[in-house]
Amino acid sequence: MYFPYLIMSKNKTILLLLEWYDYRFHSGVAQAAYKYGYNILCPRHPDITKMDNFDPLEFIGCVTLCQRNDTVENLARKKVPIIELGHIPYPRPIHRVLPDNRIIGELAADHLMEHGYKHIITINHDGRKMYKERIEALQRTLEECDGSVQMTQSKNVDECFINELKTFAINRKNQGIHKPCASFACSDLLGSDIISALLSLDYRVPNDFVVLGVDNDVLLQESLPIKMSSIDTNPEGIGYKAIELLDEVLKSNKPLDKDDITYVKPKGVICRQSTSIFNIDNKVVSDALNWIHRNFHRGIQASNIAEALEVSQQGLQKLFFEHHERTPGQEIRYQRVRAVASLLRQTNVNLLEISKSCGFTNVDTMIVNFRNEMGVTPGRYRSQFIVSNH
């Protein structure tokens, strides 16, 4: 049993050691450290072999994202509390703060099914726990709705993987399914490689293949020819929660006989070009959904959809009733509310500006529609993701 280090001095310095760096983890840690009155010791290029040179009295706790076993072994010898942000094993019990991979997988399935995709291909997780959890949740959610996940034999985006993508697409055409295929990537890095591979084969994204990633790596997005939809895992919230938890641990000094895991909810799906095509059995309904997606922010009504598609409003209503779960009017409100939710999670923009940018006539109408769809007010919803405002 491991007993956390008793604070013997007034020192309030915490070691932040990120061997896999994401500025958003650092930002969340910094914001929480400021709130709770901690200093951050962040070695720019820590020499792992000289970790013993760190005097334990220099820091009273650690927030780490380790990838090397020698780092873990050196840190484990320090009799201070550790909050690890990854899955790497430690020789003693520690606290972990991790993204909720179950919810990430469920969000991926919901997003793809909402766009009409129930049969998904994904790259082999190769036993990586984080990826495995995401794919298993994706698979469970899809199978509950008569969908499926095909995991490739390939573990990397290589020639074998490309051949498996080709076979997947050909099999669907042989089955008479002349619609875009869907791919889920457990990280944006894999997703960007998949998009590059597809484009090299003259597949169009999203017309032939839609691709959904995980991480919402904005810097990576800048290098992509096709902007990729992605699930924001909330690394800033993870960093913030790590300091919050470390503060509790330092104050409580409770013994730990096994790993203690805290899960942080992802912020949601950030929709971009790579999943912007709806794949519905009926072409008119599919075209209507795509048209709504492009125009909901313009203050459109159901009659505008029928006019744009050159069909009668009554006929459009009938087709939606037969092939979709919402009416045209409900779909407009639904997509507007989803856009509002995304802005509430990702930005500090005020409600008036959000209502205007999402096609609502005024703030009151937006609040009513949002509460009806989401079950909470915009303000309460935003408060769940308020870390970035600290």
Image (spheres, helix red, strand yellow):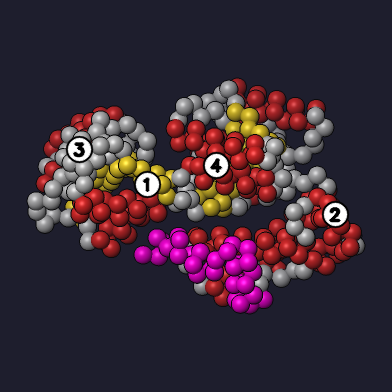
Residue named by callout 3:
2
What span is in magenta? 361-390
The quarter of the picture where residue 383 lies is: bottom left
Comparing marks 3 and 4, which lies closer to the viewer? 3
* Residue beneath the point at 62% across and 47% down: 110
Q: Nearer the viewer, residue 101 or 144?
A: 144
* Residue beneath the point at 37% across and 46% down: 262
Residue named by callout 1:
262
The quarter of the picture where residue 304 lies is: bottom right
Secondary structure under tag 2 reads helix
Cα–Cα gap, marks 1 and 3: 18 Å
Secondary structure under tag 3 reads loop
- N-terminal of the pair, mark 3 or mark 4, is 3
- N-terminal of the pair, mark 1 or mark 3, is 3
Residue named by callout 2:
319
Task: Please report contact status of discs 3 and 4: CB closer than 8 Å, yes or no.
Answer: no
x then y, percent, for residue 364 = 61, 77
Q: Which mark is residue 105?
A: 4
Tell me: 27 left or right of 343.
Answer: left
